[in-house]
Amino acid sequence: MKRLLNLAAIFSLLFAFGTAADAQTKKKPVLKKPVAKKPVPKPVTPMYSVDTGTVIRVRMNSTISSKTSTVGSTFSTTVTEPVYSSTGVVVIPVGSIVTGRVDAVKKASKKGEPGSISANFVSVKLPNGRTRTINGQLTELDSKTAKSDNEGGASGDKMKNRKLIWYGGGAAGGALLGAAIGGGKGALIGGLLGAGGGFLGERYTKGEEATVKSGSEFGVYLNQKITLPKFVEVVP
């Protein structure tokens, strides 16, 4: 009889243990999938337009020459006056870097013909690090082809079908600014870069290389409109 009681007690304990284990299994918490957070929209930065025909005033940072330059080589210039959007907002400040790229070069020949350099301008880098691709070409900074406005910008005139290049010649080995009208061979129309005015019959010297010295100033004419945000300096 005692043995039967012991067996009954054992079965009771096993049943209780199984019931408790089953209860624990049923009470096991169910993991819920995390709810995906909706992305917070980024604030839209207002953009401002700089119109086609705007002239950016720049200064050469190094010297280039038709004797050593090659097609595809680049050079840098520094913006000397701020560029404003069509609504009067500064988008390209003084100190920005405009990069030029040589697209054609001709060395001075033994026949006495001067050297020449043709260049396009492909990008502008602002002091805050922002870079923008541009489509620009060389132009003069005089009353015939560029004029200042009351905000320190500049606008171009009479630039249609004109491709300006640097020719060899002039006092002190300077370069003269030339223009090819409608794809022709070209005629010298500009002044001596960095050394006052000069014309074909007065300062043209055959057989010299085209040399554009560091510090020479000229304009970059925008062939296409660009858009940029208002310039804001990076606070260190």
Image (tube, rainbow, N blue to C red):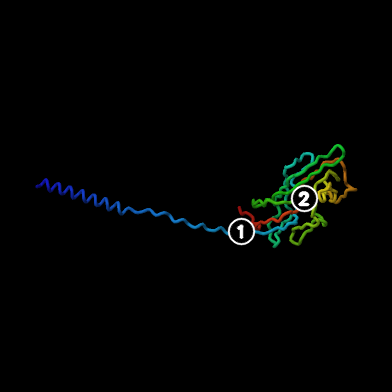
Numbered-mark total: 2
Q: Residue at x 18, y 50 (%)?
A: 12
Residue drawn at x 72%, y 57% is: 83
Return the residue found at the far left.
1
Image-based side of 67 in relation to 25, left or right: right
Callout 1, which amino acid?
Thr
* Camera-nearest residue between 16 and 203: 16
Q: Which residue is farthest right?
A: 201
Q: Which mark is residue 23?
A: none
What amino acid type should be assigned to the residue bearing mark 2? Leu
x, y percent for residue 131: 66, 51
| Contact check, label 1 and label 2, Cβ < 8 Å | no
What percent of the width, then of the height, locates residue 82? 72, 56
Residue 177 visible? no
At which x and y percent is residue 94?
A: 71, 54
* Residue 223 appears in the figure: yes
Secondary structure of residue under mark 1: loop
* Residue for badge 2: 138
CA gap between label 1 and label 2 equals: 31 Å
Q: What residue is disc 1 on? A: 45
Q: Residue at x 11, y 45 (%)?
A: 3
Earlier-in-chain disc, 1 versus 2: 1
SS of the residue at dot 2? strand
Q: Residue furthest top?
A: 110
Asked whether, in this view, residue 191 is left or right of residue 133, the answer is right
Residue pictured at 71% horizontal, 56% vertical:
225
| Percent x, y of residue 37 | 47, 57
